[in-house]
Image (cartoon, rainbow, N blue to C red):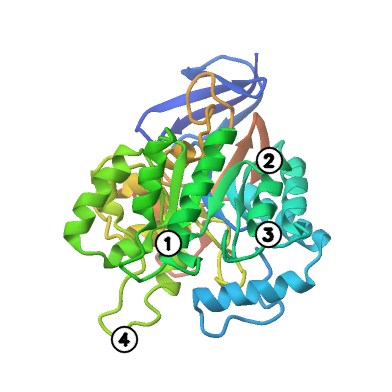
Amino acid sequence: MFDLIVKGGNLPDGRVTDIGIRGGKITAIESLDGAEAGEVLEAQGDLVSPPFVDPHFHMDATLSYGLPRINESGTLLEGIGLWGELKEIVTQDDMVTRALEYCDWAASMGLLSIRSHVDTCDDRLLGVEALLDVREKVKDYIDLQLVAFPQDGFYRDPTARDNTIRALDMGVDVVGGIPHFERTMADGAASVKELCEIAAERGLQVDMHCDETDDPMSRHIETLAYETTRLGLQGRVAGSHLTSMHSMDNYYVSKLLPMVAEAQISAIPNPLINIVIQGRHDSFPKRRGLTRVKEMLAMGINVGWGQDCVLDPWYSLGTADMLDVAFMGLHVAQMTSPEEMRTCFDMVTENNAKTLGLQDYGLRVGAQASLVVLDAADPIEALRLRAARLCVVSKGRVISRTPRGDASLSIAGRPDRVRRRHQVMS
């Protein structure tokens, strides 16, 4: 007797099968004809995917767009300044309310694991307190990892170092940093070194905002790769953004990427935000605002798309939809072959789960019973349509349902129902 059976779904790898769930775990992936269950979800012809994973977000700022004003220039630096103004007036209750609303959006979109950076450049640590509270409130349906993030610079802000350590002592999961925002390149490199040492001492993961700039001389990813290897942190470190790499000399990159691969650093490009924030000082040609995704994938580096922002001081759009993120990413990175598009889907599921170190993730017997049924036949169609999440299952329980997106048509001689699903041979 199963608690739940998902019947006849198309898995991302092309298999068509049933999935049996019992006690919050996947206990069978095979034909379950005749098996009894408390509920059966009919998924014939629909894609059944592991849940979406966002490896880079700022939940303390989300849904605050327009408070106390709008980022008129659209630049990263004005956004940082605006966030500083917002921190002066925000309350802990407000942060919790906004974060929980965003988690409702995420749950409805099948986004069930999120890594959120939380600002530690605030002596009150309101954001840390708020998101620790949210992490506890949503733990039954969303896995929320928190990164101690010294937004104004680990050394540049006079109390950031002590506050970052305080945040880790309070139970924040991951060590963060922003070396390119320190006052000098030397301070940036020193911050990478010390933050990695803190992570090594505590047995924690590292996730750095690294080289989020158009300056090709911002090369803190090189230091991050070196410190990762020196301290034995391989497989526990991520570099987020890495946009300076889009402007670096090709010869230097040919040296850099093997170092990143050797250090087993994951890369987290954030295409929605970087395509609008980067290149603001360019006229033409204008840089695309994205790191070297295809080159890193070819080197065997784990790369996953991140969302970064939704309706906050840096980005005025967003819906908690990781398919939107992957859709933008495949366009900007020009990943349009069938194999590359499937990789883009993996980049918001399996690849991101690897970055977060999720041990019980995926569609396999023994894994946590979290999955999404999409109104699409396969990963490519899911990306093309940004398909509706017909059903979201989290830890063995159905938490969201959405009707199909069919339209009624009133045109003589044409069908009365329109579906945008269209199987393309590939």
Q: Say few, some or many: other residues with alpha carbon within 10 Å of mark 4 (under 14 / 14 to 19 / 20 or more).
A: few
Residue at image location 30% in from the left, 78% down from the top = 286
How far apart, in angstroms, are the residues tagged by discs 1 and 2?
A: 49 Å
Q: Position of residue 221 (x, y in %)?
A: 37, 53
Q: Amino acid at mark 1?
A: Ala
Q: Earlier in the sequence, mark 3 or mark 4?
A: 3
Q: Earlier in the sequence, mark 1 or mark 2?
A: 1
How far apart, in angstroms, are the residues tagged by discs 3 and 4?
A: 33 Å
Say which mark, if any, is on residue 283.
4
How far apart, in angstroms, are the residues tagged by discs 4 and 1?
A: 30 Å
Q: Position of residue 263 (x, y in %)?
A: 35, 39
How far apart, in angstroms, are the residues tagged by discs 4 and 2?
A: 47 Å
Quadrant where the N terminus sits is top right
Q: Circles 3 and 1: CB distance less than 8 Å?
A: no
Say which mark, if any, is on residue 60.
3
Q: Is residue 265 visible?
A: yes
Q: Amino acid at mark 2?
A: Ile
Q: Earlier in the sequence, mark 4 or mark 2?
A: 4
SS of the residue under disc 2: strand
Q: Nearer the viewer, mark 4 or mark 2?
A: 4
SS of the residue under disc 3: loop
Residue under pointer 2: 399
Q: Earlier in the sequence, mark 4 or mark 1?
A: 1
Q: Earlier in the sequence, mark 3 or mark 1?
A: 3
83 lies above or below 201: below
Q: Position of residue 310 (x, y in %)?
A: 59, 64
Q: Say few, some or many: other residues with alpha carbon within 10 Å of mark 2 (under 14 / 14 to 19 / 20 or more).
A: some
